[in-house]
Image (tube, helix red, strand yellow):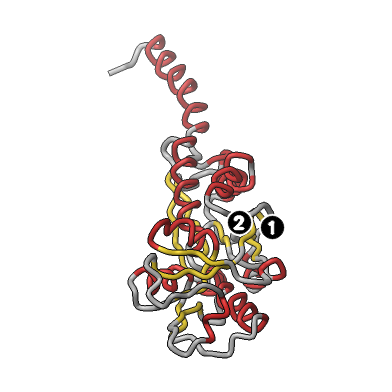
Amino acid sequence: MRVPTSRRLGVLTALLVLLPLAACGGGSGAGGERNAPSSITVLAASSLTGAFTELGKRFESENPGVSVKFAFDSSATLAQQAVGGAPADVLATADQKTMDSAQQVQLDEPKVFATNVMVLVTPADNPAGITSFSDLNTSSVKYVVCVPTAPCGSVGAALLEQNHITSDPVSTEVDVKSVLAKVTSGEADAGVVYKTDAIAAGDQVRTLPIPGTKSQVTTYPIVTLTQSKNTSLSQEFINLVTGPSGQQVLRQAGFGPP
């Protein structure tokens, strides 16, 4: 059956109109990245859990259809995973040294976005009667710290040495969240954690200052990873973290300025 010339022209015109629209919709990622996924995965130090979870929700609300997935763990573990090619887009660590260990998978220069200091926490009822950091030298006091390979562990060890604490911890935990859990559960009389974690724990703990923390400030850098499938979206998340809105959330969580 022969199709009338006028009908053929109508079909051709419709196709010409649709083709540019299809081309515009070919990339699902931010910044026009073709076939880019509408989600990113962020590897972040465990001490960032509360603040980054809130920022992830804010990012999703500002970018409908986009999802942010998080993996919170020890910075050393996350850096190792990133170097091993873990399918992630962004890395945020709790110290520069750990970030430097992942230099080979950094797309650009890491940017410091926050600082933190460590404090001593006890259970709310403080059964051991701890009143100062020096009480950790009391033989009956059971305290916990992070493993030396984690940033919280290396800073904690420096503070113990700086304050002449010679007694040994009853255990070393993989990250600061695990230290806090030992204290809030009553398994330990005290623990060395970040100020932000003590704030997040609220009335579950009592907080005591550690002398000399000004010389042991922790810095938090963030970077897009070379294996990212959506570098534009990753950079947008970093922009949120380092921008005014993200900085406000971090300050409210107890983090210091970069």
**Observer-nearest residue: 190 or 59?**
190
Q: Nearer the viewer, residue 18 or 251?
A: 251
Which residue lies at the image location 62% right of the left edge and 45% below the top edge? 239
Q: Earlier in the sequence, mark 2 or mark 1?
A: 1
Seen from this angle, which residue lies furthest top? 6
- The structure residue drawn at horizontal position 61% and vertical position 45%, both measured from the top left corner, is 247
Q: Position of residue 130 (x, y in %)?
A: 48, 75
Q: Which mark is residue 108?
A: 1
Q: Amino acid at mark 2?
A: Thr
At horizontal 39% and vertical 65% (from top left) the residue drawn is 124
The quarter of the picture where the N terminus appears is top left
- Residue type, numbered disc 1: Asp
Q: 240 above or below 142? A: above
From this view, report whether residue 251 is shown above or below residue 72. Answer: above
Q: Position of residue 89 (x, y in %)?
A: 53, 57
Q: Which residue is mark 2?
A: 224
Number of other residues with Cα within 10 Å of mark 1, as a class: few under 14, some 14 to 19, many 20 or more: few
**Residue 5 placement, left or right of 132:** left
Label 1 sits on a secondary structure element that is loop
Quadrant including the C terminus:
bottom right
Q: Is any atom of residue 18 visible in this view?
A: yes
